[in-house]
Amino acid sequence: MSSLLHLVLIGLFDGIVSTAVMTLTEVQSWKKWGLVGVFEWHENQMIITRLIHHSDNDREKVHFIGIFSLHFLNGALAGMVFPFVVSVFTFLTVVTMPVTVLLGIIYGFALWILTLVPIHKPITRFSPWNHPLGHMPALASLSGHIIYGLVLSIIATLTL
């Protein structure tokens, strides 16, 4: 198997597992604040309802299959990129577990800042900074992404 394909498959696996752990942490936010309190799920709900052109009466129905399909797709794709991020740093220094974990935490933060924050308001009409539920959903979302990056990095040290 080529090294490129190997890295892609490892990243895919690592991303799916990391997304599963992240999802488990988001369940508490969903129980506390509902769908609008879990930024990623709310975005995916809005995307799915637009894609399948639901009537106004059906827009309130939570589409968990669509939400989690998009959630795991995004997590898997982001996971596929992480081995390449780590490989860049192997040229600069010896990549150890602490370095990889730090990279994972930074990666989770970067994903949140670069991919979630800019699209949240245009998709959901809720500002992550001025959310009707306050700042806690934003902090929960950020911590979910940090956990994603942390788990991703730990698994990567075992699989790379």
Image (cartoon, rainbow, N blue to C red):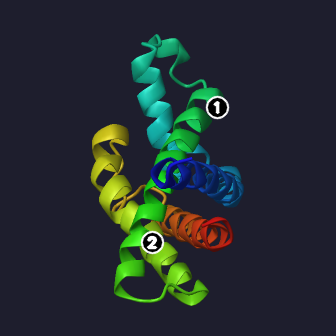
Q: Secondary structure at mark 1?
A: helix
Tell me if 96 is positioned left or right of 117 in this view. right
Q: Secondary structure at mark 2?
A: helix
Q: Is residue 40 visible?
A: yes
In the rendered image, the vertical position of residue 110 relative to residue 49, given as above or below: below
Q: Quick one: 23 or 85, which is closer to the camera?
A: 85
Residue 150 found in image quarter? bottom right
Name the residue beneath numbered marker 1. Answer: 64
Q: Are marks 2 and 1 in contact (CB under 8 Å)?
A: no
Residue type pointed to by label 2? Val
Q: The C terminus appears in which quarter of the rendering?
A: bottom right
Q: Residues within 10 Å of mark 1 (few under 14, many from 20)?
A: few
**Residue 143 — which label?**
none
Tell me if 73 is positioned left or right of 24 in this view. left
Q: Residue at x 46, y 14 (%)?
A: 52
Q: Residue at x 48, y 45 (%)?
A: 74
Q: Quick one: 155 or 7, which is closer to the camera?
A: 7
Residue 127, x across and y down, in percent: 33, 54
Label located before the other in sequence (2 or 1): 1
Name the residue beneath numbered marker 2. Answer: 86
Q: Residues within 10 Å of mark 2 (few under 14, many from 20)?
A: some
Q: Residue at x 61, y 37 (%)?
A: 68
Residue 122, x across and y down, in percent: 27, 42
Residue 41 found in image quarter? top right
Q: Is residue 36 visible?
A: no
Residue type pointed to by label 1? Phe
Cα separation between marks 2 and 1: 33 Å
Residue 82, x across and y down, in percent: 46, 62
Residue 20, x across and y down, in percent: 68, 52
